[in-house]
Image (cartoon, rainbow, N blue to C red):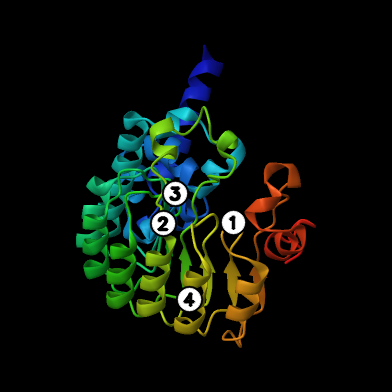
Amino acid sequence: MDEEKESETESRTTESEWAELTHECLINILFRLSLEDRWRAAMRVCKAWHQACKDPYLNSVLDIESHFVPANELPRFWTPEFERRVDNMLRSVVVWSSGSLTEIRVRHCSDRSLALVAKRCPNLQILSIRSSPHVTDAIMAEIASGCPKIKELDISYCYEISDKSLAIIGSLCPNMHVLKRNLMNWLDPSQHVGIVPYEYLNACPQDGDSEAAAISNFMPHLLRLELRFLKLTAKGVTLISKGCKELEYVDLSGCANVTSRDIAYASLNLKNLKTIKKPNFYIPRSSFHTERYGHWQLYDERFQTDVFRI
């Protein structure tokens, strides 16, 4: 019995010592924890810790991207229930940040949470909302108006966002340096089947050249641009090269309608270009009829059959 009492006394003493930490010391400790550790453990320790976890200093960044690596992509991520969970988390962090939020990296959010971001995050610089099927042009217009300091935007796999959003964001966010507008692999959608809803896969945006025109006209200071599997043509690539001459990195992987000649011509305008990722496919000759291009020499010239070597 004496040993039990002694152990209980020691436990209370330890809890008392933790509870008596100054707010500054507590913040310093919590800052060293991961976001997951703060949400799942630290916030549940006691009232003082719960309040400390809401400090704006600890909520200037919301980054849960690491939880969505390709190997962990699950069908449940595309459900309304999961979307509500992400929205609730984002809304909480926005409120706790008291305007200090500068970086958001989430997925599967919606207009509901981004409406609050637009109103309360004037210092936001990085917004990554990949795979968010219910984010629309309407809310992106509000984001552009309320968050003019955005310099990096990732709207990959957001199929309700169009060239209209790109135009207004480019015009109201003059510091835009990084744009990621990748689409899912529509050439071989098998990697998404069973995970992404079928109707969403079929909703893939069709007019890549309109998006290219918006990028060219309103984002002249881009340094990095990712357009994987965007349905571009030579016209779109040329527009981008003429309007975004500061580009250093371009990713056109999967842009099946763009040829090596198109890229070589457009690259002449990009004096700062350091890296360009080009379409890289193997298209078996048996998949096409020779009469489609007249003769195999022309076919080889257009499609670079040796794995596109471009």
Secondary structure, mark 3, is: loop
Circle 3 residue: 157
Q: Pick the residue in front: 144 or 264.
A: 264
Q: Residues within 10 Å of mark 4 (few under 14, many from 20)?
A: many
Secondary structure, mark 4, is: helix
Residue located 52% across and 54% down the image? 32
- Could you tell me if the residues under marks 1 and 3 are in contact, i.e. CB atoms within 8 Å? no
Q: Residues within 10 Å of mark 3 (few under 14, many from 20)?
A: many
Q: Earlier in the sequence, mark 2 or mark 4?
A: 2
Q: Amino acid at mark 2?
A: Ile
Measured as percent of width and height from the top left, residue 152 is found at: 44, 68
On screen, residue 288 above or below 305: above
Circle 4 residue: 240
Query: Which marked residue is nearer to the observer: mark 3 or mark 4?
Result: 4
Circle 2 residue: 155
Q: Earlier in the sequence, mark 1 or mark 3?
A: 3
Q: From the viewer's perspective, is 199 left or right of 47? A: right
Query: Which marked residue is nearer to the observer: mark 1 or mark 3?
Result: 1
Query: Which marked residue is nearer to the observer: mark 2 or mark 1?
Result: 1
- Could you tell me if the residues under marks 3 and 4 are in contact, i.e. CB atoms within 8 Å? no
Q: Amino acid at mark 4?
A: Ile
Distance between the alpha carbons at the discs numbered 2 and 3: 6 Å
Query: Which marked residue is nearer to the observer: mark 2 or mark 4?
Result: 4
Measured as percent of width and height from the top left, residue 284 is found at: 74, 45
Label drawn at residue 256: 1
Q: Is residue 170 visible?
A: yes
Q: Earlier in the sequence, mark 2 or mark 1?
A: 2
On screen, residue 60 above or below 220: above
